[in-house]
Image: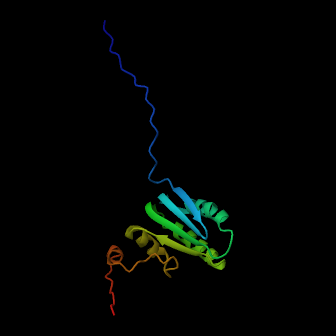
C-alpha cells in the first residue's frame, strides 16, 4: 500500500492591509497638522481622526490638511461628521483643507455637503462630469 503524502509548507505571511481599513498618519510642523488618510473613511474613522489631531491643536489658528491621495472611499454618512468637525475648528480659528482628494471622493462630499463648507467641490470639469452635469467656466 502506498500512501500519498501532502507536503506541508511552514511559511508565515503578513496579511496585506485591507482596503476598507483606515490608516492615519499625522505629522505636525509649527501651526500646520498634515494628516494622510489611507483606506476608507467612515464615521468611526472620523472620530479616530479627530482624536488623533486634537492633541496637536495647542493654539488657535492652526491649519489642518487632510491628504486624501491614498483614500479609496468615503462613506457618505461620514460627511456630516466632517462638516460638524470643521465648524468646531472654525470656532477656534482653525482651517481645514482637503488636499488631493479624487473626483470620486469630491462627488461623494458634494452629495452631502450642500453648502460646500468643506470646499471639496472643485470647479474641474471632471468633477462636474462625474456628477452628471456640465460646468460653465467663465474666463475673464
| Residue in the foreground of this view, choosing between 84 and 53 | 53
User: Which quarter shows the N terminus?
Assistant: top left
Q: Residue furthest bottom?
A: 140
Please indicate whether residue 28 sits to the left or right of residue 21 in the image. Answer: right
Give the vertical position of 25 relative to 107 (above or below).
above
User: Which quarter shows the C terminus?
Assistant: bottom left
Q: How many marks?
A: 0
Please indicate whether residue 134 sits to the left or right of residue 32 in the image. Answer: left
Q: Position of residue 139 (x, y in %)?
A: 33, 90
Q: Which residue is at a point 44% across and 44% down the rendered structure image? A: 16
Q: Position of residue 77 (x, y in %)?
A: 52, 67
Q: Quadrant of residue 80?
A: bottom right
| Residue in the foreground of this view, choosing between 112 and 22 | 22
Q: Position of residue 36 (x, y in %)?
A: 50, 61
Q: Residue furthest right?
A: 58
Q: Which residue is at a point 46% across and 54% down the rendered structure image? A: 20
Q: What is the basis of the colouring in this image?
A: rainbow
Q: Position of residue 108 (x, y in %)?
A: 43, 70
Q: Residue furthest top?
A: 1
Q: Which residue is at a point 64% across and 61% down the rendered structure image? A: 51
Please indicate whether residue 26 sits to the left or right of residue 100 in the image. Answer: right
**Residue 41 appears in view:** no
Q: Which residue is at a point 61% across and 77% down the rendered structure image? A: 87
**Residue 118 appears in view:** yes
| Residue in the foreground of this view, choosing between 56 and 19 | 56
Give the vertical position of 49 relative to 109 (above or below).
above
Q: Quadrant of residue 122?
A: bottom left
Amino acid at each position: 500500500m502506498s500512501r500519498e503524502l501532502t507536503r506541508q509548507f511552514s511559511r508565515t505571511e503578513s496579511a496585506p492591509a485591507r482596503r476598507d481599513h483606515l490608516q492615519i498618519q499625522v505629522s505636525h510642523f509649527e501651526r500646520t497638522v498634515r494628516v494622510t488618510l489611507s483606506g476608507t473613511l467612515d464615521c468611526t474613522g472620523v472620530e479616530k481622526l479627530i482624536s488623533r489631531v486634537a492633541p496637536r491643536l495647542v493654539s488657535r489658528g492652526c491649519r489642518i490638511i487632510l491628504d486624501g491621495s491614498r483614500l479609496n472611499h468615503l462613506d457618505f454618512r461620514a460627511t456630516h461628521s466632517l462638516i460638524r468637525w470643521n465648524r468646531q475648528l472654525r470656532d477656534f480659528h482653525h482651517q481645514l483643507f482637503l488636499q488631493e482628494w479624487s473626483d470620486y471622493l469630491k462627488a461623494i462630499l458634494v452629495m452631502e455637503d450642500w453648502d460646500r463648507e468643506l470646499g471639496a467641490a472643485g470647479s474641474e470639469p471632471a468633477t462636474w462630469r462625474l456628477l452628471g452635469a456640465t460646468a460653465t467656466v467663465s474666463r475673464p
